[in-house]
Image: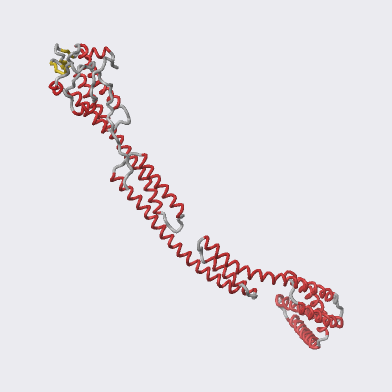
């Protein structure tokens, strides 16, 4: 991309005061001869810079002293020919017939002052920061031509000296402008390079976690900075501008290609997600009328897990698909909730019935003997049969009422177990046999203790005897 550079128009500022002219002549009066005009005609450059003179009155913007000083370098002969002194020689500069010598000399003196004013104006212009090298060259070319052999009366040597000094100053000014331009160009290149490096850094850091919208905004901002920099800074060399633009454009191309690739992959993922979610919706619609509450609830949970794993299909698509899935899910879960509400009412009624049975059951205990236990068992069996026929109660109450009923059963069973143990003949036989064994073992231990002389062994036998005596006392 080429720089947006503004063409620099160069204007040579050599505006001067209009030179005074002789008083207007009638057609009958004499005018300068063609030969004299040709002999003293200014150069083409001078003609381009100096307007055609028309005789005017003696009005002038110059001080009379300056005019008189310039007149001192010239003379007018009897024929109205005007001469200027240049060192030891003099040169004809023009004719002004039919006018006084003072008028003729003053005219050419004022022309001298006009020319000097141009040099003075250029000297002032050289101090300006807005002057351009082209303006300097063109102005010097014009002034050089105008001061080479000027048709004026005045200190010609001083004009030449002043022009030489201006040429020196002009060269220094051009060098200063060139150096400033070089520095400005280097600064502009550095600033433009920073914009390029930021773009390249953005392109180098593209990845799965890139925020594409934010990055696009950053590239847009960098491009605006680039355009603003072209408009508001110095025009840099075409080679540098083209090289930097090539780098910037390459970074933008890298980003645009990556974003298009991401967008295509995103579209594919969304299309696949939409397909998967449509399949899930179809399965949900098949399940929504089911009354197998537990199994179907698990199936809907599985469908929800698959939905989350399917990814996004786009905001508008997702909203529509989700509404369809929720409609099917709500149909099932609302029906399940209605069933649960109905069931909860029945369970509460069952709870009240079972709590009434608990009152009857808990009235059966405590029992004192086997006969009371037997009667209580029969009544408890009838209560339990009725209990089972009632059905489910609320889950939070189940353990509480089942525990109370179990307590009644345990109390009756404890009396039954005690009565059974007392009436068990085999238990008495086992008790008698064990008692006989313990007594025989104690007799044997007495004999061994009596015969043992080792104090440690004797103490061990006595400890064993004491343990068996405790066992014997426990079963007697």
Rendered image quadrant of residue 91: top left
Give x and y (percent) for residue 211.
Answer: 46, 55
User: Going by the image, does 358 lie left or right of 197?
Assistant: right
Rendered image quadrant of residue 138: top left
User: Going by the image, does 401 lie left or right of 36?
Assistant: right
- Whether 218 is drawn above or below 356: the answer is above
Give x and y (percent) for residue 253.
Answer: 37, 54
| Residue in view at x 72 percent, y 71 percent | 342
Q: Nearer the viewer, residue 33 or 231?
A: 33
Furthest toward the front, the residue is: 28
Q: Nearer the viewer, residue 356 or 288?
A: 288
Rendered image quadrant of residue 132: top left
**Quadrant for the C terminus in the image:** bottom right
- Whether 313 is drawn above or below 472: the answer is above
| Residue in view at x 48 percent, y 67 percent | 272
User: Going by the image, does 401 lie left or right of 4?
Assistant: right
User: Going by the image, does 378 lie left or right of 117?
Assistant: right
Give x and y (percent) for residue 402.
Answer: 76, 74
| Residue in view at x 45 percent, y 59 percent | 208
- Whether 251 is drawn above or below 76: the answer is below
| Residue in view at x 43 percent, y 52 percent | 216
């Amino acid at each position: 991309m080429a720089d947006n550079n503004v063409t620099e128009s160069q204007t040579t500022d050599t505006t001067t005061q209009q030179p005074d002219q002789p008083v207007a002549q009638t057609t009958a009066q004499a005018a300068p001869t063609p030969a004299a005009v040709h002999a003293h005609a200014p150069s083409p450059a001078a003609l381009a810079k100096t307007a055609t003179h028309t005789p005017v009155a003696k009005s002038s913007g110059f001080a009379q002293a300056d005019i008189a000083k310039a007149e001192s370098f010239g003379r007018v002969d009897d024929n109205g020919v005007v001469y200027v002194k240049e060192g030891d020689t003099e040169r004809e500069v023009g004719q002004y017939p039919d006018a006084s010598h003072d008028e003729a000399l003053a005219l050419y003196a004022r022309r001298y002052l006009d020319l000097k004013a141009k040099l003075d104006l250029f000297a002032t212009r050289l101090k300006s920061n807005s002057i351009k090298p082209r303006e300097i060259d063109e102005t010097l070319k014009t002034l050089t031509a105008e001061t080479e052999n000027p048709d004026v009366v005045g200190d010609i040597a001083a004009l030449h000296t002043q022009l030489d000094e201006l040429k020196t100053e002009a060269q220094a000014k051009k060098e200063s402008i060139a150096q400033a331009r070089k520095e400005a160009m280097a600064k502009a290149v550095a600033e433009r390079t920073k914009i390029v490096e930021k773009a390249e850094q953005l392109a180098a850091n593209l990845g799965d976690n890139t925020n594409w919208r934010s990055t696009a905004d950053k590239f847009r901002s960098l491009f605006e900075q680039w355009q603003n920099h072209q408009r508001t800074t110095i025009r840099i060399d075409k080679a540098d501008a083209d090289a930097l633009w090539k780098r910037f454009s390459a970074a933008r191309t890298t980003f645009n290609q990556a974003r298009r690739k991401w967008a295509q992959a995103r579209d594919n993922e969304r299309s696949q997600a939409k397909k998967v979610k449509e399949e899930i919706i179809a399965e949900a619609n098949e399940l929504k009328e089911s009354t197998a509450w537990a199994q179907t609830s698990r199936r809907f949970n599985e469908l929800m897990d698959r939905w989350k794993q399917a990814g996004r299909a786009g905001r508008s698509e997702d909203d529509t698909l989700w509404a369809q899935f929720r409609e099917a899910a709500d149909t099932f879960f609302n029906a399940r909730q209605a069933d649960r509400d109905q069931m909860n009412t029945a369970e509460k009624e069952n709870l009240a019935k079972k709590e009434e049975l608990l009152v009857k059951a808990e009235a059966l205990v405590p029992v004192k003997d086997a006969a009371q236990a037997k009667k209580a068992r029969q009544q408890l069996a009838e209560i339990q049969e009725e209990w089972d026929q009632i059905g489910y109660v609320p889950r939070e109450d189940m353990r509480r009422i089942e525990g109370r009923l179990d307590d009644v059963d345990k109390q009756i069973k404890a009396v039954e177990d005690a009565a059974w143990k007392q009436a068990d003949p085999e238990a008495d036989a086992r008790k008698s046999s064990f008692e006989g064994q313990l007594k025989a073992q104690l007799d044997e231990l007495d004999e061994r203790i009596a015969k043992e002389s080792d104090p440690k062994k004797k103490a061990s036998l006595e400890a064993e005897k004491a343990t068996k005596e405790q066992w014997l006392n426990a079963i007697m």
